Amino acid sequence: MIDLHTHSLLSDGGLCPAELVQRAKLKGYRVLAITDHIDSSNLDLVVPHIAKFCQEINSLAKGIRVIPGVELTHLPPALIKKLARRAREKGAKLILVHGETIVEPVPKGTNRAALDAGIDILAHPGIISEEEVRIAQQKGIYLEISSRRGHSLTNGWVAKLAKQMGAKLILNTDTHGAEDLITLEEARKVLQGAGLSPEEIEETLRNSEELVERIL
């Protein structure tokens, strides 16, 4: 299992990074990204701490690789590119943006600004247009299928447009607590529920492998 969207108590998650890693490992995870919510108020604090933690844990933990990342969240769209660049400079190897969704009041224009900023994953982008999916396809930006309650309600729409436009999908949990971590078999069921065929499910899972290889 590879999961590139999780949160620790450094933002709104319920577990410290070490416990998050240990619980994920016991669930069968072999790659985990910690992508806490950031904006300009906490970027300089959170990103270096997560980067240092990942460096330490990767030198000692067996059977799991941990990647430092961020999820830029609820920002004015004009700030996304600037903060994505700064997060990378501070040690984030993976940049997510909290996409426009039906369950949270993300500013309109976030999806397009994120795609223009050259991020890695547009997280749970339930309110996404055909044009935006086409841009994601052209730029090689992954669109997230989410197992998270609420955000998962629009998985079918994201999957449908991605298949039509040839955009790449990726499955993540948006974990905030231990109960959100899932097994590989559960991941396949979430993808099936999004309307993907068995072949498309396996391709989506391979996309996680592809992205990990690209960023490391």
Image: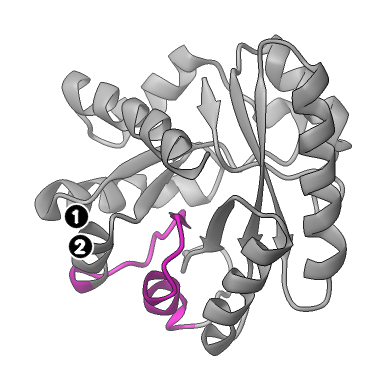
> Where does label 1 land, which residue?
161
Name the outermost residue toward the left: 164
Mark 1: amino acid: Leu
Between the C-alphas of marks 1 and 2, the distance is 14 Å
Q: Position of residue 215 (x, y in %)?
A: 49, 44
SS under mark 2: helix
User: In this orientation, which residue lies closer to the viewer: 183 or 136?
Assistant: 136
Dot 1: element: helix
Could you tell me the amino acid type at mark 2? Gln
Q: Do the numbered discs 1 and 2 sit on residues whose CB atoms are within 8 Å?
A: no
Looking at the image, is 37 positioned above or below residue 82? above
Residue 11 visible, this orientation = no
* Residue 63 lies in quadrant: top right
Neighbour class for label 2 at 10 Å: few (<14), some, many (≥20)? few
Quarter location, residue 191? top left
Looking at this view, is 107 or 66 the one in front? 66
Range of the magenta residues? 108-131
Which residue is at the front of the view, 160 or 117?
A: 117
Which residue is disc 2 drawn over?
138
Above or below residue 107? Residue 129 is above
Q: Residue at x 60, y 50 (%)?
A: 93
How would you rate the neighbour count of disc 1 (Cα within 10 Å): few for under 14, some for 14-19, many for 20 or more? Answer: some
